[in-house]
Amino acid sequence: MQSVLTRALAFAAGLILSGYAAVAPAPASAQQGEGWVVLFDGKAMGDWDKVGETNWRIEDGAIVADKRTSKTPAYLVSKKPYKDFMLYVEFWASDDANSGLFLRCLDPKKISDRSCYEVNIFDQRKDPSYGTGAITRYVEINPMPKAGGKWNTYEITIKGRQLSVMLNGAKTAELHNGMFQEGPIALQHGAGVIKFRKVAIKPL
């Protein structure tokens, strides 16, 4: 009888421990390791220039924009230029959001997919081949993953002529191209609601 009770108690303890493991906090992010620079930590706007007009603000640990006040998209542009780097971004987008991450921009005051590499966030783009997960004008995606209504991660590595993009841990685009060699990065608000919870960069 005692052995049966012992086994039952051990089984119950195992269930409790496995349940705890499922909800236990994950280990510290690798983006906090050596060489990483946090450009936004959920507390302060950080070292960014504003280009265009929208209502950038901090809410619940995220940079949020949901009401553009000009006809053209608005951006947060890093004050520093970057050449080779790893970029980690946590973002939340509404289903109708038009946003993106712009890399190696030629002119910090004129951001576009013609003067930067753009990693898109745009679930409802009319041509979905360059929607979320794609590198606009360079690398199409099919089928297009959806980012709307949830938190997502972009992990981007750009070194020399090589650019690779991972969305939520899955590679969505890879490019070998030497069009843009160095410049600031930019976060876009074009439409809908966009939130950026963490932005970290590691120069290579």
Image: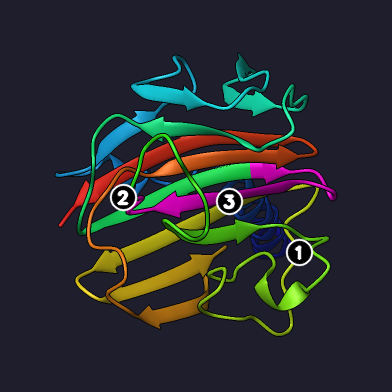
Name the amino acid type tagged 2.
Ala
Q: Quadrant of the C terminus?
A: bottom left
CA neighbours of label 3 inside 10 A, class few (<14), some (14 to 19), many (20+): many
Name the amino acid type tagged 1.
Lys
CA neighbours of label 2 inside 10 A, class few (<14), some (14 to 19), many (20+): few
Circle 2/circle 3 CB separation < 8 Å: no
Question: Mark 2 to mark 3: distance in Å?
Answer: 23 Å
Image coloring type: rainbow
Q: What percent of the width, then of the height, locates residue 21?
A: 56, 51
The reply to whether the magenta stretch includes residue 19 is no
**Which one is earlier in the sequence, the residue at label 2 or at label 3?**
2
Q: State whether residue 168 is above or below residue 139.
A: above
Question: Mark 3 to mark 1: distance in Å?
Answer: 14 Å
Q: Is residue 85 left or right of residue 133?
A: left
Per the image, the residue denoted by label 3 is: 100
Q: Is residue 78 left or right of residue 188?
A: left
Residue pictured at 50% horizontal, 59% vertical:
118
Q: Quadrant of residue 164?
A: bottom left
Question: Mark 2 to mark 1: distance in Å?
Answer: 25 Å
Residue pictured at 74% horizontal, 62% vertical:
1
Q: Nearer the viewer, residue 177 or 84?
A: 177
Name the amino acid type tagged 3.
Gly
Per the image, the residue denoted by label 1 is: 146
Q: What percent of the width, then of the height, locates residue 18?
A: 61, 55
Q: What percent of the width, then of the height, locates residue 81?
A: 23, 42
Q: Is residue 3 left or right of residue 40?
A: right
Q: Is residue 68 left or right of residue 86?
A: right
Q: What percent of the width, then of the height, locates residue 44?
A: 44, 14
**Which one is earlier in the sequence, the residue at label 3 or at label 1?**
3
Q: Quadrant of residue 55?
A: top right
Per the image, the residue denoted by label 2 is: 30
